[in-house]
Image (spheres, rainbow, N blue to C red):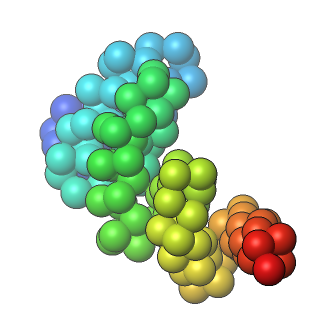
Amino acid sequence: MQRAADAGHPGAMNNLGVLLYHEGATEQARTWYQRAADAGDLDAMANLGSLLHEQGDAEGARTWWQQAADAGHPGAMFNLGILLHEQDPEAARAWYQRAPDTRHPGAMANLGALLHEQRDAEEGST
């Protein structure tokens, strides 16, 4: 894996990042995710967003998740929806509504929950 990553293979860079992350080497993982993301690997963009979110960098996470989601990555769409759920429910809804196309069960479930919350709020205001 290391040789392929060193040779510039974006998928190998991301996979090496995953291995390092699971070994607890998060800064090394971040470096490989970053390199793979910069090379256009959607999984690495999503993974980098998750790592940044875990480290408390919500804005960095949003940036990478947005980029991966815009390119069609289902997990990034889901994570972006979760991130936006409280602050911008309509934006979250838009990402969750793409869930049937991606078959991401978590996003479909969250869409249902968000629609239920919005219906309850609308009924409560009348």
What residue appears at the point 47 percent right and 33 percent down from the top-left corner? 53
Q: With respect to residue 106, does 4 lie above or below?
A: above
Q: With respect to residue 74, does 48 lie above or below?
A: above
Q: Quadrant of the C terminus?
A: bottom right
Quadrant in which residue 22 is drawn: top right
Quadrant in which residue 12 is drawn: top left
| Residue 88 in sight | yes
Left or right: 88, with 119 as reference point? left
On the image, the x and y values in percent for residue 89 come to: 57, 64
Pick the front one: 115 or 30: 115
Q: Residue at the far bottom: name it.
A: 101
Pick the front one: 1 or 95: 95
Left or right: 112, with 35 as reference point? right
Left or right: 15, with 111 as reference point? left
What residue appears at the point 33 percent right and 19 percent down from the top-left corner? 28
Q: How many marks?
A: 0
